[in-house]
Amino acid sequence: MVLLIWLALKRRGLSMGTLVSGRWQTLGAFFRDLALAVGFLVVAVPLKGVLVHLIGGDANSNVASITPKTVFELVLWLGLAATGGFCEELIFRGYLTQQFNAWTGSPAFAIVLQGVVFGLAHGYYEKVMLLIMVQGCLLGLFAYWRKSLRPGMLAHGLQDAIGGLIAFFS
């Protein structure tokens, strides 16, 4: 999917940087985005946990069979978490949000639509998928507020990596 997006951008004379909003120009800019990502997780993860409890879901039941059990699997998981954070943010918060905004003329509706598609792409979570939709919308708002995908990419990658680490060590 990222390859298709890259080809579509290239055909229009654009780069991936146009979706991501460039690169970090300084180490300080990286740490600012990292701090924002951690702040996002401090708010979003407990909120998601409360909502999972309220709907009577179990976010871990359907993914327990794919969490890392060996050191090799953990290393692969951490690599997947990094690429997943980048790729999913690029696809959903970058490309799809721009497309939905172009189709609807509404940034708010575009954020909601990409969140719904993001949740549907995580259908293996069953009813917790609804909360993944909410998280997708929150990440969409985060990207819209920051005018960049970078903090969301860091937050998404960190959340996935931490989830794998917790599963591995528990």
Image: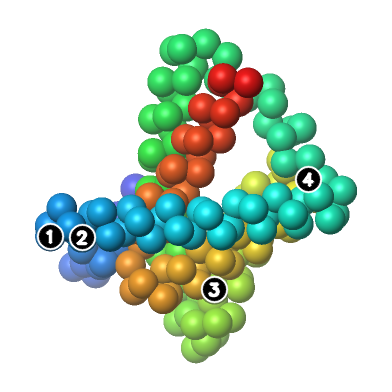
Q: How crowded is mark 3: few (under 14 residues within 10 Å), some or many (20 or more)?
A: many
The residue where tag 2 is placed is: 29
Does 15 sit left or right of 128 as displayed? left
Above or below — where is 169 with respect to 33?
Answer: above
Could you tell which of marks 4 and 3 lies nearer the N-terminus? 3
CA separation in Å, label 3 and label 2: 25 Å
Q: Which amino acid does label 4 sit on?
A: Glu
Describe the element under mark 4 as helix, strand or loop.
helix
Q: Residue sitting at 53 percent across and 54 percent down? A: 42
Q: What residue type is labelled 2?
A: Ala
CA separation in Å, label 1 and label 4: 41 Å
- Which of the pair 61/35 is nearer the observer? 35
Could you tell which of marks 3 and 2 lies nearer the N-terminus? 2
Picture coordinates of residue 3, whole percent (x, y): 34, 48
Could you tell which of marks 1 and 4 lies nearer the N-terminus? 1
The residue where tag 4 is placed is: 126
Q: Is residue 103 visible?
A: no
Describe the element under mark 1 as helix, strand or loop.
loop
Q: Look at the numbered discs 1 and 2 and tell me whether their residues touch, using CB distance below 8 Å.
A: yes
The residue where tag 3 is placed is: 111
Circle number at residue 160: none
Which residue ends up furthest to the right in the rendered image? 56
Q: Residues within 10 Å of mark 4 (few under 14, many from 20)?
A: some
Q: Which amino acid does label 3 sit on?
A: Ile
Does 53 sit left or right of 106 as displayed? right
The residue where tag 1 is placed is: 25
Q: How many labels does the image show?
A: 4
Location of residue 90 by image quarter:
bottom left
**Quarter in which the C terminus is drawn:** top right
